[in-house]
Amino acid sequence: MNIVSIFNDVIGPVMRGPSSSHCAAALRIGRLARDLMDGEISEVLVEFDRAGSLPTTHESQGSDMGLFGGLLGWDADDERLPNSTQALSEAGIKLRIETVDVGDPHPNTYRLTLTNTREMHTLIAISTGGGMIDVIEIDGVPLQMDGGYHETLIWQHREADTPVCHSGRSAADRCACFTSDAEVLTYDLGDKQLIQVKAADFAGTADLKSLSVKKLSPVLPVPSRQNLHVPFTSCADMLRHDGAQNTPLWQLAIEYERTRGNFTEVEVINKMTDIVRILRKSIASGIAGTSYEDRVLHHQSGRFAEMMNAGRLLDGGALNRIILYVTALMEVKSSMGVIVAAPTAGACAALPGAVIAMAESMNQSEEDMAKAMLAAGLIGVFIATRWTFAAEVGGCQAEGGAAACMAAAALVTLAGGTRDQAIAASSMAFQSMLGLICDPIANRVEAPCLGKNVMAASNALSCANMALAGYDPLIPLDEVVDAAKAVAEHMPREHRCTSLGGLAITPTSLEIERKLATLKSKDCGSCACH
């Protein structure tokens, strides 16, 4: 089981684009595919299953942008990403995108066939939510790769009397060429075998008798390592672990991430403080004004700021500042500016907008903001371990619901509330978001996502105050997450981020989509997108 990291799975990545499930995840898949080809790609075939989410969303929600950027070796926050289609063509890489009928069980499945002058390889990977991925097959061999390890792939002849290395050791001995902390997996390919070495560094291969060796670098900010143990993985586990100590949630988050990432306490706080600073800069740029041709909504947060500062809005107290910051971040996302998936790009604004706005209203420091974000991150760990942040799997309750749940704990933390009050707020906030569908208007992750982020932040504030006042959540947090998962399993495909239901299929939505497509086709000309 992948052990969740706050900085891998919950708060992050730092990225550009409308959707982490599409943009950031696709970019990471592209990076691994590039390594599989030793950085040399002449042709790539991308196939999407007709029954999945990607045939209708890969272009408008940023899968193409992210995947092409990854194939070019770029990072998720690279300023060139909006032009990755053109850059791929200029790099001489021929591209085909096709829809196929293969019955992929996961809606976010990428099937890549990559070619250069020397070789061809295939790779199948899935986006699991919030920018996280799983490579599930390479060259027809089922395997697992989440981007957290240095992965060394070694193809060899399989004759029984042929040693793996020149020292005479066989694959069964796992070979002294590999370090003791490596996980070595062997796959039978008839007269050949594939050896997969997962470790903190690449395996030494100079002494190996190999047909081919590939080295795929990690794509996650917090690397994985063997024999990793964390103090708890669920809310119930954490409560048993902490007992009657009533340790503040942010301190428990530091304890968890120190173990998961092998960090010091100072390093954990500094990492989150750096993220807070990125977010504050993005909020300021959003209020100042953003623009992007291929988007549904224009810049609106600047006008809200003017009205708020002039006293011409209804008195919402700190909530008005929260609304301003949430909408500013959503506008930055929609203009391909720098955001942080927290826990996803589609729900990137509710948590940080609520935390930063409330902390500023309370004259609190960036370190206080970081501690609140860490508390939220630990709640996100409990969700990600049990379920998903992917709307394609769980509907918007998996994104907006999770964001509200996390933000409620963060706001209680800012208020100096207890561990149990933060958990109570989280449970209440998530309970009221169950069943939320994902239905992006015109196939863009802008609306009703904007309103849902505002609703999530407002819900978080309400539940934080209710928890501080002693309201009873009744249902434990872990059970609420399980309930959301059960709801998702009965949710029609049309309501899980495939633009086939809800507001996405209203006449106005379809007309907006048609107009945007017409505008883009004029700009695109004869690009090699398809």
Image (cartoon, rainbow, N blue to C red):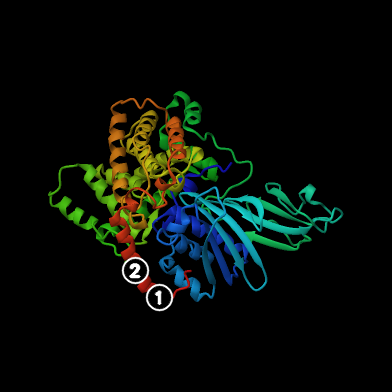
Q: Which residue is mark 2?
A: 518
**What amino acid does circle 2 point to?**
Thr
> Mark 1, residues whose alpha carbon is within 10 Å: few (<14), some, or many (≥20)?
few
Q: Which residue is mark 1?
A: 525
**What amino acid does circle 1 point to?**
Gly
Mark 2 or mark 1, which is nearer to you? Answer: 2
Which x, y percent locates residue 49?
A: 52, 55
**From the viewer's perspective, is residue 28 above or below residue 518?**
above
**From the viewer's perspective, is residue 364 above or below residue 328?**
above
**Residue 365 is at least partly visible in this image:** no
Q: CA distance from mark 2 to mark 1?
A: 11 Å
> Mark 2, residues whose alpha carbon is within 10 Å: few (<14), some, or many (≥20)?
few
Residue 193 numbered mark, or none? none
Quarter holding residue 159: bottom right
Which residue occupies 87% across, 54% down? Answer: 161
Quarter holding residue 336: bottom left
Relative placement, left or right, of 462 versus 175 is left
**From the viewer's perspective, is residue 523 above or below residue 29?**
below
Mark with earlier residue (2, 1): 2
